[in-house]
Amino acid sequence: MVTTNIMVVYTATHSTRGGIQRTFLLAILICFILGIAVGWVVSATAPKDVQTSAAAWFKAFGDIFVRLIRIVIPPLIFFTIAAATSSIANARRLGMILVWMLILYIGTSALAAVWGILAGQLFAPGVGVGLQPPKDYKPPTPPSGIDILMSFFQTDFNALLAVGGAMSMIIFAIILGVGVTLLGDEGRKVAYYLSLGSKTLIQFVRMIMYYAPIAIFAYAAWLMISYGPVMLGAYGKFLVAQYSFTLFHFFVIYSIIVWLGGLNPIKYFKAQFTPFVVAFTTRSSAVTLPVNMDAARRMGVPEEVFQVTVPIGATVNMDGTALYQALSAIFIAQLFGIPLAPYQISLLVLAAVVGSVATAAIPGGGTIMLAYVLAVVGLPLEGIGIMLVVDPIADALRTAVNASGDNACSVLISRLLGYKLNPQI
Ligand code: ASP
């Protein structure tokens, strides 16, 4: 009875959404292009003080959206993962989802780190540039391996409610979900309320999403005014290296993965468009999570799979970040004229995978964790200050690809578990 009710609500809300989705997609695209155009015009024609104040206003309108979504992220992660794990009665199936997820998430991130190293060698963006770190910059203390491990296990429940506590929240939700399953019949009632909670929060997000096109417009304009000149300047080569290899990973590697998963890559890219643009402009995988789950649903990934893989992926699977961190390390070594031995380069792949897993799904998280990667390879931490200059532009694409990787892997995981996809695109 309970299951039937859920199904009725689910089908009713979803049958009316095709048209809305298309309009929404168009609105996002138009607002993104408009934002870039307005930002470009302002940065090319307005006096400096007008530019500064316009950029601050645009950023504020984007930040409203990000703040609204950030509030809902901890409960959303809790309810979706706990609901999903408690509804998978078959523990073996849950185990298989988790095992395939880890293999694919780590495998694709390692591959991305290799692309980062190749991009660094091929484009040699830092060779002969001779940049100096900013004068007032103090290098941060990088976290140790133990620090990173222990950050997954917080001491207070409060810490789980911060976006930075997402990993601890995931662990908590999985254990709780398994506990609910083990309760048997009584547990089924709890599972029902967990699932209702998850649906309510998703509805909350859907309402906020009506504001997304405005936020996307505002962020695109802000990025263009604040960072447009940087793209054409000294960091251009780094960005060309990063963007070309990251886009290669997105278009080629994800096409292969979804094709292996039995989904036409065109359908994948179509469904992934909205999360891509939302991630690109908000620069946060956590903020993109709700739209990414919606895209997974439209690709036909079963709820049982995406409710586990996508929220966990938002926190741990960051191919764009792994590529960026590996490339940045090579770039910094080149800037300071430090040659890297082959063993340091292999270590870099490992460090970039761990660094990307430990990166918080927030704007600039990857550059903060770059301190860990540089420390492992033995490179000067002053490099962080240098990378901060281009961070927002570098962050935009790496976040878009971070989010897209979760859905590509979810498609393949579904196939590996024997599901047949039923895409709604
Ligand atoms: N902003 C990225 C994300 O949320 C993390 C990073 O800075 O690399 O996925």
Image: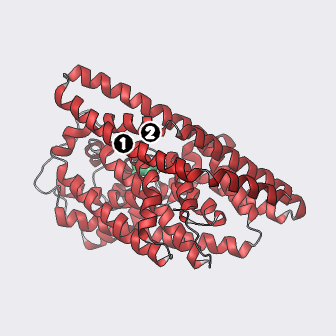
Q: Residues within 10 Å of mark 1 (few under 14, many from 20)?
A: some
List the residue tagged with mark 2. Answer: 213
Name the amino acid, label 1: Ile
Evaluate whether residue 372 shows in this view: no
Q: Is residue 53 above or below residue 182?
A: above
Left or right, residue 72 beside residue 119: right
Under tag 1, what secondary structure?
helix
**Foreground of the two, 251 or 28:** 28
Left/right of residue 22 with respect to residue 115 in the rendered view: right
Asked which quadrant contains residue 150, the reply is bottom right
* Number of the front mark, 1 or 2: 1
Image location of residue 152, percent across then percent down: 58, 54
Q: Which residue corresponds to mark 1?
A: 30
Circle nearer the N terminus (1, 2): 1
The reply to whether callout 1 and callout 2 are in contact (CB within 8 Å) is yes
Mark 1, ligand 1, within 8 Å: the answer is no
Give the percent coordinates (x, y) of residue 374. 33, 55
The image position of residue 265, as x and y in percent, is 42, 69
Mark number, residue 234 = none
Secondary-structure class at tag 2: helix
